[in-house]
Image (cartoon, coloured by chain):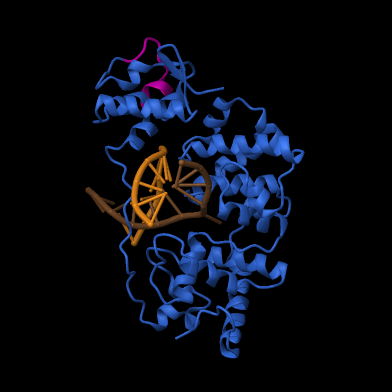
Chain colours: A blue, B orange, C brown
Amino acid sequence: MPSPHIADPSPQDAQRLAQIRDRIAAWYASDGRDLPWRCPERTPWGVLVSEIMLQQTPVVRVLPRWLDWMRRWPSPADLAEAPTADVLRAWDRLGYPRRALRLQAAAQAIVADHGGRVPREHDQLLALPGIGSYTAAAVSAFAFGERQCVIDTNIRRVHARLFSGKGLPSRSLTAAETRLARSLLPEQRAASVVWNQSVMELGALICTARSPRCDQCPVQDLCAWIAAGRPEPEEAPRGQSWKGTDRQVRGAVMAVLRAADQPVPESWLTRDRQVTLPRGASADLARPLEALLTLESPVEQRQRAVDGLVSDGLAHRRGDRIALPG
DNA sequence: AATTCGTGGTG
DNA sequence: TCACCAAGAAT
């Protein structure tokens, strides 16, 4: 039964922790992915963009969007002055398009308050729109090499299994988890960066949520969860509702607006089962519009979704038509 | 603390 | 097939 190394770890625990660090670091050096936001030429801005895009979004989906984005807007100042419609279209289908809005707002704040350079300190990053506790720590650590306690979903899962012997972490981050994570973080800056990065990568590639590849894990023999016989997770995950919700309609409306090269009549977005396409509608407009119009959602729900997008700043009303802002 | 917010791949 | 899941943040 491994103790959680909170205050005064025993020599045994200290030795086990040192082994864990070394092995995971060695595994990361040989098996870690070669991602463009990890290459030596990366910029703090590139790291920040990647962290925002990667929120709740798989790496494979982010890769092509990140490459285009960095070529088009290689600095915060470039993004700051871009038309919002361009930003939302470049975001494409990464999901949660409010992130794109906040990323641009963050770029504008970086220009206004930090001379156009991404700040390196946690508190200053945290003050930027769309940047929370995780992203602030991640940018500070991965872009600037600072010693930060990074806690994301991967790291939480590895900690839960390796040190706490649980199948999965609880739904929300607890104070005990944060304490544990702090106690595990190496004192030296360079070592702390490697620890953050390598544990996160282990969670992403080996210690996965669904079917972990324990046979490939470098610390299999040191894992508290395996020692406990891989017990099932305690609380069942709560599903993310989607079908028949406003989110589904918001997504469909955004798809139409992204594809449209001119403002779209609001009635097309809200009338139930309207199938007549606008005269001269392009093929790009027709496809998502058709998908939207066949959604079995009440007219009132569609109206609510449109209103929500407008009030969130993701869409703009011009008379009875709506379009992307900017 | 519990919800809301997109999108698409997958076990 | 269909929940579940993916480098969370804001409220």
Q: Is residue A257 above or below residue A186?
A: above
Was residue A285 drawn as part of the magenta stretch in this picture?
A: yes
Q: Is residue A224 above or below residue A136?
A: below
Quadrant location of the C terminus of chain A?
Answer: top right
In the image, farthest residue toward the right: A115
Q: Residue at x 53, y 23 (%)?
A: A325
**Nearer to me, A42 or A118:** A118
x then y, percent, for residue A316: 48, 21
Q: Quadrant of residue A231?
A: bottom left
Quadrant location of the N terminus of chain A?
Answer: bottom left
Q: Is residue A266 above or below residue A171?
A: above
Q: Quadrant of residue A188?
A: bottom right
- In the image, taking residue A176 as reference, residue A15 lies left or right, namely right
- The magenta segment: A277-288
Was residue A46 drawn as part of the magenta stretch in this picture?
A: no
- In the image, taking residue A101 as reference, residue A244 lies left or right, namely left
- In the image, taking residue A152 as reference, residue A295 lies left or right, namely left
Q: Residue at x 39, y 25 (%)?
A: A307
Asked whether the viewer can see residue A75, the reply is no
x then y, percent, for residue A162: 48, 75
x then y, percent, for residue A33: 58, 59
